[in-house]
Image (tube, rainbow, N blue to C red):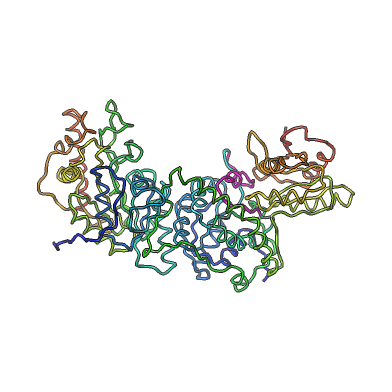
């Protein structure tokens, strides 16, 4: 059924359809309407889920670690400072190999205070062992949550589903909401390998000496290496059942273009419009959306940019001292390749400032006109 | 009073790594006898992250979930929720946390869980300091005690935090203090806790020979003197209101307790008087609470 819903409502539908057993969350703008919606659904009896209304995000993740160890399907949502506060437990969840799904509504981190969107929160969790999937629209948000459980429970790693503050979280769009039966046939119940059983007592996450710890982390890496194949299979099956699929990346615009513009999240939608216009005007430019940030889709990207001469990246995030994080990851991915394209790293839209069509056009124009970037960080729309 | 049998069942196996005379090891053995094998125990960071042994071994015969330092109350809430969803209402969820994980870094998660009246037994194994990291002060360290972060030139300036009062004021159904010098009392309180639903809090007093600079064969004696000197009175609180104090008839001056422990070796006569006064005040406060 088609409904006009916000991104946060799409999250709630994703949670309902995935038959989550235990939710634990703490409110933070702009995630709040997710927990409000879920509370309403549970209070009215439409959703049979335990909701632990804990006193902090740290406890939210810890509670899910307990519940997921207990062998049930778990969910939380947060944003910005809340995600940063969870940091310790994010490492714990992946180390304990728990298939928890977390929705993060991208928001800047203070100081100074700011409640609007940028990706600094989720990207500063890139080394925590979580799979990260970035969404472009509300339909993708719902679909990605359902897919996330399939992937997480297969590879035994937690998944972070990411959407932009306000532009998606609080903006209504038409979304096709699949039926419970359709999703049930796609997403089977969670069957953990080692569920708690007092008849067969086990010690979970017991201290592990240097003699074995390396092997535990090796297995996390191996699980990450399974993700491209597993998520492709899951996405292909989703596409065949629901008529929608997303891939780890998506290339659009002119084939064999000289310049490829790389974006993630909602900036991609604006870029699609700009690139369509520029293609009509004869510009040799294409777009590349990165959905899966962890594990980074290096091979997929390399295949998609074959023939291009330059890459432009718009990063709505900043690792101070280096620059945009997507640009940094792309440079690292391209380094071992023979064709080491120049990467133009643009930084823009921090703290929720709009990345307008004009700014995107400016970035493309700069890339076309310069053989190499004049500076490592190219600031878009900076007030000087 | 009904005679209490100490169960023969053993759920702490051989080969654990506790120090000689460790009060907590005896506390654990008794606790697991009382709780039985249908128990899942959550362990935030403490000596008990180490004592049961490292992967792939464990000296526990119960399910043990090791968890982040801050998280005992929250992790146990999640485990309980999972069991409820699975329809397992029989298995007990318990927490075993140190005084650091309870009085200090874990207090927020514990308070949150207690306010929600989460259904588990929270056992605080109080050895009055950060013993696993080598005896640093905690907010459970007594007034004027030596620790590595409160050297004798500047011993602990503040009295111990009243965790039982804090827990009582969460209106949880049951809270009790216990110690291994009174094993029947300890077993009785745990068995009573087992029969109640909601958040149950057991404050266990467990001497730590290396941390307290005491002889390892005096663990039980010091536990008993803690009760007799009213350093650690034995009592129960039901629903945050109804107090039952297990009155000890043979009261001794606090000096008898202090003099067996090197951590109080630097105390002057005046310091001992100060400590005695603090103990008397705390006892009076407890009695006032018990009367209302």
The quadrant of the rendering that contains the C terminus of chain A is top right
The quadrant of the rendering that contains the N terminus of chain A is bottom right
Report whether A364 appears left or right of B38: right
- Give the residue displayed 53% in from the left and 45% down from the top: A84
| A42 versus A352 height, above or below | below
Q: Nearer the viewer, residue A204 or B184?
A: A204
Q: Is residue A127 magenta?
A: yes
x and y percent of residue B170 in the render?
Answer: 33, 54
- Give the residue displayed 37% in from the left and 67% down from the top: B89
Quarter holding residue A242: bottom right
x and y percent of residue A38 in the render?
Answer: 53, 62
Quarter holding residue B9: bottom left
Residue at the front extreme of this rendering: A211
Which portion, as a residue range, is magenta? A112-134
Residue at the right extreme of this rendering: A282
x and y percent of residue A380 in the render?
Answer: 74, 39
Q: Nearer the viewer, residue A327 or B116?
A: A327
Report whether B146 appears left or right of B53: left
User: Taken as a whole, is the magenta stretch helix, strand or loop?
Assistant: loop
Residue at the top extreme of this rendering: B153
x and y percent of residue A337 in the render?
Answer: 74, 42
- Give the residue displayed 58% in from the left and 55% down from the top: A159
Q: Is residue A342 magenta?
A: no
Report whether A167 appears left or right of A340: left
Q: Nearer the viewer, residue A55 or B234?
A: B234
- Give the residue displayed 64% in from the left and 58% down from the top: A7
Residue at the bottom extreme of this rendering: A181
Report whether B285 appears left or right of A240: left
Quarter holding residue A200: bottom left
């Amino acid at each position: 059924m088609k409904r006009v819903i916000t991104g946060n409502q799409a999250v709630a539908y994703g949670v309902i359809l995935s038959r989550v057993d235990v939710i634990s969350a703490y409110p933070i703008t702009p995630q709040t309407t997710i927990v409000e919606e879920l509370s309403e659904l549970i209070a009215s009896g439409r959703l049979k889920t335990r909701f632990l209304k804990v006193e902090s995000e740290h406890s939210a993740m810890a509670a899910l670690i307990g519940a997921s160890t207990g062998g049930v399907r778990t969910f939380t949502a947060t944003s910005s400072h809340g995600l940063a506060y969870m940091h310790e437990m994010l490492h714990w969840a992946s180390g304990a190999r728990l298939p928890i799904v977390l929705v993060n509504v991208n928001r800047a981190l203070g100081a100074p205070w700011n409640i609007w969107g940028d990706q600094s929160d989720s990207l500063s969790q890139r080394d925590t062992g979580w799979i990260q999937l970035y969404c472009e629209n509300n339909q993708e948000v719902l679909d990605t949550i359902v897919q996330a459980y399939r992937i997480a429970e297969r590879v035994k790693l937690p998944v972070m589903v990411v959407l932009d503050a306000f532009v998606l979280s609080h903006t209504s769009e038409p979304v096709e909401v699949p039926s419970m039966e359709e999703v049930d046939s796609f997403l089977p119940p969670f069957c953990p390998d080692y569920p708690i059983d007092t008849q067969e007592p086990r010690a979970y996450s017991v201290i592990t000496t240097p003699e074995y710890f390396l092997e535990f982390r090796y297995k996390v890496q191996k699980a990450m290496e399974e993700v491209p194949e597993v998520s492709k299979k899951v996405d292909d099956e989703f596409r065949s059942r629901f008529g929608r699929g997303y891939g780890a990346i998506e290339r659009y615009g002119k084939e064999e273009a000289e310049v490829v513009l790389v974006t993630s999240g909602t900036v991609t939608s604006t870029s699609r419009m700009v690139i369509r216009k520029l293609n009509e005007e004869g510009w040799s430019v294409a777009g590349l959306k990165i959905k899966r940030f962890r594990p980074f889709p290096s091979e997929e990207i390399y295949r998609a940019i074959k023939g291009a001469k330059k890459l432009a990246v718009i990063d709505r995030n900043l690792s101070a001292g280096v620059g945009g994080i997507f640009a940094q990851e792309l440079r690292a991915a391209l380094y071992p390749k023979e064709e080491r394209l120049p990467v133009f790293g643009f930084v823009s839209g921090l703290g929720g400032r709009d990345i307008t069509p004009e700014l995107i056009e400016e970035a493309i124009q700069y890339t076309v006109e310069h053989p190499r970037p004049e500076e490592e960080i190219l600031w878009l729309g900076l007030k000087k | 009073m009904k005679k209490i049998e100490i169960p023969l069942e053993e759920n702490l196996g051989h080969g654990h790594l506790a120090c000689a005379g460790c009060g907590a090891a005896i506390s654990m053995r008794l606790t697991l006898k009382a709780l039985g094998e249908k128990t899942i125990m959550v362990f935030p960071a403490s000596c008990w992250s180490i004592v049961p042994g490292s992967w792939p071994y464990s000296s526990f015969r119960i399910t043990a979930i090791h968890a982040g330092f801050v998280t005992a109350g929250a992790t146990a809430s999640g485990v309980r929720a999972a069991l409820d969803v699975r329809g397992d209402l029989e298995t007990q969820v318990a927490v075993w946390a140190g005084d650091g994980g309870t009085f200090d870094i874990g207090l927020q998660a514990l308070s949150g869980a207690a306010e929600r009246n989460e259904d588990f037994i929270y056992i605080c194994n109080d050895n009055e300091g950060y013993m696993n990291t080598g005896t640093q002060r905690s907010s459970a360290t007594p007034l004027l005690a030596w620790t590595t972060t409160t050297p004798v030139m500047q011993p602990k300036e503040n009295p111990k935090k009243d965790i039982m009062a804090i827990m009582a004021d969460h209106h949880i159904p049951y809270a009790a203090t216990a110690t291994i010098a009174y094993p029947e009392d300890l077993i009785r309180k745990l068995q009573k806790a087992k029969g109640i639903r909601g958040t149950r809090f057991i404050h266990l007093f467990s001497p730590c020979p290396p941390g307290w600079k005491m002889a390892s064969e005096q663990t039980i004696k010091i536990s008993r003197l803690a009760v007799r000197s009213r350093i650690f009175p034995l009592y129960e609180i039901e629903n945050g209101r109804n107090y039952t104090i297990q009155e000890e008839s043979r009261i001794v001056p606090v000096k008898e307790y202090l003099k067996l422990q090197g951590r109080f070796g630097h105390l002057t006569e005046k310091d001992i008087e100060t400590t005695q006064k603090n103990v008397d005040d705390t006892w009076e406060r407890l009695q006032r609470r018990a009367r209302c």
